[in-house]
Amino acid sequence: MAAQQGGGADLARLRRFNEQAVLTAVRTAGDRRVAEIAADTGLARASVEDVVRGLTERGWLAEQAPVAVGRGRPARRYRFRGEAGRLLGIDIGAYNIRAAVADLDGTVLASVRTASTPRSSRTRRLAALDAAVRDCLAAADTNAGDVWLTGVGTTGWVDRSGRVVLANAIPDWSGVDLPGHLAATLPGPVLVENDSKLAALAEQRRGAGRGVSDMVLLQAGRRTGIGLVIDGRLHRGAGGVAGDLSLLPTLKWESAVEFLRQCPLPPTGALAGNRIDAVLAAAGTGDPTATRAVRRYVRAMAGAAAAAVAIVDPVALVLAGSLARRCDVLLPPLVEELALLCLRPPEVRASTLGADAVALGGVCLAQDRLESHLADTDRPLAAPSAS
Amino acid sequence: MAAQQGGGADLARLRRFNEQAVLTAVRTAGDRRVAEIAADTGLARASVEDVVRGLTERGWLAEQAPVAVGRGRPARRYRFRGEAGRLLGIDIGAYNIRAAVADLDGTVLASVRTASTPRSSRTRRLAALDAAVRDCLAAADTNAGDVWLTGVGTTGWVDRSGRVVLANAIPDWSGVDLPGHLAATLPGPVLVENDSKLAALAEQRRGAGRGVSDMVLLQAGRRTGIGLVIDGRLHRGAGGVAGDLSLLPTLKWESAVEFLRQCPLPPTGALAGNRIDAVLAAAGTGDPTATRAVRRYVRAMAGAAAAAVAIVDPVALVLAGSLARRCDVLLPPLVEELALLCLRPPEVRASTLGADAVALGGVCLAQDRLESHLADTDRPLAAPSAS
């Protein structure tokens, strides 16, 4: 039998395979007894004990204080040592910069938000980014050196190296090298991805799309965007532009929000925060002009969303972005429009992560890199080196 | 170490993992020496020898006649025993029914084609299908009982059970139960899939898209269709309708071919086989009216293809279907249109499998099922039982 006669390379491969299965089982469940890990992974009890011992020695797992249940000696419980390091998630948009510090299992310890504007220069936006990172690390009582990995979401087309190739939403943003800029502050690797893609990743991992294998995320904000999860994984596309419909003339969806901006405000609407919020609020109270504007906005978005749905045929579509806080107003007409345009309309769900989705997606991206790091190393738990 | 202390379940899992790696290496390469298999798979030589012995005993591999190279005893070579069984691929379209008998490694032994028409009744089409299967088995000197698995491609929306949910191209076809019908003739499992999807699978495995991870197939025939390969796998979608753009009103692509049908025929064109062929032939000789019609046809198709490209961001787009035999005429304008509509235009390639793509896709589907069958069984090589 291969495992008995084979050389060291085969056994090392099997051990990694088993280690990763055990670590995933413990991390997903919070904490776990050996018998539970064996049931989760299909591994034999003796194998689990052996793997758990190795992972504990190397600092990935820690033994929990035992909880006595009934008589007899309580079974040992193990947990993932999330506190061993920190991850940083960042969202750089046209209007907001957000940052979140999390531990290695994704629990958010602190988050900050700072306002920006599309007219801000690249230099000022990068300075605001640095300030947000500094403030967030301080709020989480974390040194930059403790941040193992950073995941950044930003508007536009991002290539595999993390460079922003093209960003229409921020005039001065195309070409920016965020890993290069952040290297001055953060010693760990910096991963950059398009913001709608990271929102999709976050919603699929810990939000409205949890566990959904095929998902379309429709980002409804001052701009519109699409993020895709296919077969349980974030779909980037060969060049990183999967889901970007901006050049398709028949689908005019980027300008969809103009239907809301140009809607005449009802008298009471002036009370709301801004024009778009006011129109959504008025539609929520049944104002006919506002309701018509919302319908036209949703129809324009649905045309593009339906193209994504027709291509991917997802289990669910998640409505996210800043306007998704008014899902009470937007979801019913969206469901109606999709029913007309899709052979098999997906379940339509509201984002549960709200404005934090992109920064949380950055944390998820960092977690994924951490897992692949484990699979490639025999070393004790330690921060991956900068790439 | 897990592999040494673990129980039988872990070892069985490792053995399957190794067996599948060895079998894939041998099958892909044609035939292979132990040292080559070890290099391909990363397994230790002792493991490979052990796995090869087991697979040979169970009938999956056979030892090749040794070829002496230089001095010394020639190294033993092993090959996949493709001749141990047969696979059948079928294509049921509105105008043609095709069948191909292949051995287990996909080598085609015989193929047949029979004409049909969209106006044919379901009963007559099924009778023509049965005749095609009979003729193809006879041509390959094969009994129906030797066909381990059958993969069928047909027009329309096909659900996971193999039922045709909806087929616009053939009026009498919606609801047809092909696995049920073919069970009377073929004892092995029958898998059914949409025809554009199977064409995409075939081109990615053995045609123009060989080895391409993300690929869009554009089926250009009397009807238009899209098939997707994402991350190296056929993408079906949650309900089996991925790539079906038929309900999107802005993309009018299903009627694209009308631009060719309604083009006034040049005087010399009457010589060609049918009106569409005549227009394509005239465009090939530079006729301005035909060239304009081709441009409008391609533009209509490109609008839908660009939506698929924008969503998937593939490495390559493969133009296939019956009209793809005139890729000399169609490819240049298609490349131009996609350059206008795509942020990152993919490489555009012509199908290399031509009219056989769908039936070959059926063979590929059957091969995939055969591989997953190996992964689930300890039994000797034998036909999977009907599901």
Image (cartoon, coloured by chain):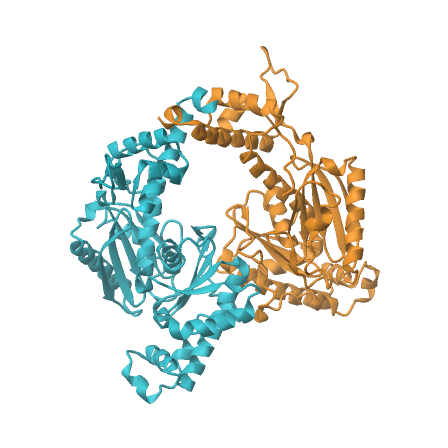
Chain colours: A cyan, B orange
Q: Is residue A287 left or right of residue B180?
A: left
- Between A157 and A341, which is closer to the camera in this rendering? A341
How many numbered tags mark residues here?
0
- Can residue B208 be seen from the camera position used here? no
* Residue B264 % position (x, y): 77, 70
Q: Residue furthest bottom?
A: A267
* Residue B277 % position (x, y): 76, 59
Report the quarter where the C terminus of chain B lies.
top right
Report the quarter where the N terminus of chain B lies.
top left
- Which residue is rendered at x = 32% and y = 29% of the image? A50
Q: Is residue A232 left or right of residue A94?
A: right
- Between B207 and A208, which is closer to the camera in this rendering? A208
Determine whether B340 is above or below A201 in the image.
below
Determine whether B103 is above or below A226 in the image.
above
- Which residue is rendered at x = 31% and y = 56% of the image? A360
Q: Residue furthest right?
A: B271
Q: Is residue B60 left or right of residue A168?
A: right
* Residue A210 % position (x, y): 39, 55
* Residue A275 % position (x, y): 33, 80
Q: In which image quadrant can residue B83 be found?
A: top right
Determine whether A187 is above or below B259 in the image.
above
Q: In which image quadrant can residue A356 be found?
A: bottom left
- Between A384 and B113, which is closer to the camera in this rendering? B113
- Which residue is rendered at x = 40% and y = 52% of the image? A159
Determine whether A346 is above or below A79 in the image.
below
Q: Is residue B134 left or right of residue A22?
A: right
